[in-house]
Image: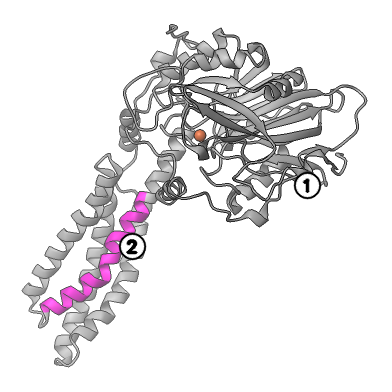
């Protein structure tokens, strides 16, 4: 294995570890500041009004004076206890480092202490129905002791994500997670579901496929043709081959773009790590000279090992002559002085700040260039984009000249969206898997997209797309062109000869 070429001599000095960084962040913040106190007062006021009614109902039928004492006592208790417990929950939440322990400390820790204290006080003031009074208050406040810590947890996780995604010390280590998941619980559940059952057709009607060949404008001069593939997943024990038709199609393009998903490096084990063998690079070089192949390293597996292994991967790709983009130091690549190709990722399995995230993509726009975004985004194993994904695509199509995505492991719709001026912008939601050694059929589908860029106007003027599929026989995985894809039976392939004339670009 090649030695790491350190691109930043100062990197070692800037190195921080996740735990250390979080500890520093926490130390800088007060355990309970103005925001925490205000939140506690609000909760105490709402809680007191609610609990007063419950105490009145629980003691109804006893002498009025005793009811009044019990209710007023309960109100005072509730206000003081909620004020105290909300403050204590916020303080307790900040003490442990692990999110689950934070939740536990705030919820069970403070909740049980409050319950014990409430019982003691009612016993001391002689409340006639201690059990009923305490039980009704407990039943009402159990939600508070669960929901409030949950809200704190949600806020903490969002803050933590923001911290690493916008890290100023972006060359730092954030520590290795053994079971990394880039999504929240709901989306993770969906990924598991879609791995167990066939991918759904939900939202199919929202995004139609454009024709397999499309033309936006006639040009006299030969355009620059860029071929795009999706995710280059590790080949496992397989070698990689390409069928002749695919080799010919890619040979006709000037450049090839693909997503190098994973790492050439190695390191301590964590679940779902994607480790490449350099043999995949030998195979790619049979498609085109390495200097004409642009590889994005902006994906959720680029940081699977650690920062050194990420540096090693980039260094090795560059030593082999490949054009690398989609890193924080080089998010974009300029092609032929015409195209600004921007890599960005929505997801990452390991937390770090050294990849360009999708929300930073527009920082890389270049005026006067054809700006093509090549994002690693969307949702795994979903054929059609969800509404929130569509909204994001439409927003990005306002500023980019084309958006060509990947990550879902399945090919997705290629479509056009008009911007405010009526200009049609291509969005290819996902090019699926370009290579894989996985012997699971649903992971073997992808797409080849060609885009023609006019050398004068620097705009996308035409293009075409076609399905690709990996066929594994023995230890050889062959990527082949296909007119059809079993995931999209409604696309018969008969429309393949048609050329759709799109509205002219302005
Ligand atoms: Fe991915």
Answer with the quarter of the image where residue 343 lies. top right
Way the structure is coloured = one colour
Answer with the quarter of the image where residue 377 lies. top right
Mark 2 vs ligand 1: CB under 8 Å?
no
Task: Say if residue 315 shows up in the picture.
Answer: yes
Is residue 313 rendered magenta in the image?
Answer: no
Answer with the quarter of the image where residue 338 lies. top right
Label the magenta part by its dominant secondary structure: helix
- Above or below: residue 491 compared with residue 303: below
Residue 81's x, y, as percent? Answer: 22, 64
| Number of other residues with Cα within 10 Å of mark 1, as a class: few under 14, some 14 to 19, many 20 or more | some
Badge 2 element: helix
Q: Nearer the viewer, residue 50 or 400?
A: 400
Residue bearing the label numbered 2: 41
Q: Nearer the viewer, mark 1 or mark 2?
A: 1
- Would residue 229 appear left or right of 126 to someone viewing this image? right
Residue 476's x, y, as percent? Answer: 51, 22
Task: Say if residue 330 shows up in the picture.
Answer: no
Q: Nearer the viewer, residue 51 or 488?
A: 488
Q: Residue at image x 14%, y 87%?
A: 66
Residue bearing the label numbered 1: 418
- Would residue 52 appear left or right of 198 to someone viewing this image? left
Residue closest to the far right: 220
The residues colored magenta run: 130-153
**Image quarter hosting the C terminus:** top right
Badge 1 element: strand
**Mark 1 and mark 2: span between their CA atoms?**
50 Å
Residue 23's x, y, as percent? Answer: 30, 33
- Above or below: residue 447 compared with residue 45: above
């Amino acid at each position: 294995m090649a030695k790491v070429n350190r691109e930043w001599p100062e990197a070692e000095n800037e190195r921080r570890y996740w735990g250390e960084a979080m500890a520093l962040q926490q130390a800088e913040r007060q355990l309970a500041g103005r925001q925490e106190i205000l939140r506690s007062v609000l909760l105490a006021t709402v809680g007191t009004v609610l609990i007063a009614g419950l105490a009145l109902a629980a003691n109804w039928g006893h002498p009025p004076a005793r009811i009044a004492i019990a209710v007023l006592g309960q109100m005072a208790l509730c206000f003081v206890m909620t004020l105290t417990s909300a403050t204590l929950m916020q303080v307790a939440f900040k003490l442990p480092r692990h999110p689950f322990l934070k939740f536990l400390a705030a919820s069970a820790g403070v909740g049980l202490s409050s319950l014990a204290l409430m019982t003691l006080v009612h016993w001391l003031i002689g409340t006639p129905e201690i059990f009923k009074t305490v039980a009704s208050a407990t039943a009402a406040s159990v939600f508070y002791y669960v929901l409030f810590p949950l809200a704190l947890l949600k806020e903490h996780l969002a803050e933590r994500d923001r911290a690493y995604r916008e890290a100023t010390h972006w060359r730092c280590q954030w520590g290795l997670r053994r079971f990394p998941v880039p999504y929240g619980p709901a989306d993770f559940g969906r990924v598991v579901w879609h791995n167990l059952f066939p991918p759904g057709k939900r939202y199919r009607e929202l995004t139609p496929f454009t024709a397999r060949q499309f033309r936006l404008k006639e040009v006299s001069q030969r355009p620059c043709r860029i071929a795009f593939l999706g995710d280059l997943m590790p080949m496992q024990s397989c070698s990689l081959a390409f069928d002749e038709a695919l080799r010919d199609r890619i040979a006709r393009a000037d450049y090839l773009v693909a997503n190098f998903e994973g790492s050439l490096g190695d390191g301590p084990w964590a679940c779902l790590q994607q480790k490449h063998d350099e043999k995949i690079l030998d195979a790619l070089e049979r498609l085109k000279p390495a200097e004409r192949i642009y590889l994005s390293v902006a994906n959720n597996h680029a940081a699977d090992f650690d920062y050194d292994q990420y540096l090693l991967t980039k260094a090795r790709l560059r030593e082999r002559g490949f054009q690398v983009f989609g890193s924080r130091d080089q998010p974009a690549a300029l092609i032929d002085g015409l195209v600004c190709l921007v890599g960005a990722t929505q997801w990452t399995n390991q937390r770090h700040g050294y990849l360009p995230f999708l929300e930073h993509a527009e920082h890389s726009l270049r005026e006067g260039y054809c700006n093509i975004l090549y994002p690693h985004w969307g949702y795994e194993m979903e054929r059609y984009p969800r509404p929130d994904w569509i909204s994001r695509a439409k927003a990005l199509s306002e500023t980019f000249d084309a958006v060509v995505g990947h990550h879902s492991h399945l090919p997705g719709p290629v479509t056009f969206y008009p911007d405010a001026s009526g200009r049609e912008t291509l969005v290819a939601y996902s090019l699926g898997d370009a290579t894989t050694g996985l012997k699971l059929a649903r992971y073997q589908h992808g797409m080849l997209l060609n885009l023609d860029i006019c050398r004068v106007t620097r705009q996308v003027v035409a293009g075409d797309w076609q399905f690709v599929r990996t066929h594994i026989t023995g230890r050889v995985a062959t990527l082949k062109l296909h007119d059809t894809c079993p995931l999209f039976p409604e696309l018969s392939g008969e429309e393949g000869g048609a050329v759709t004339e799109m509205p002219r670009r302005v």
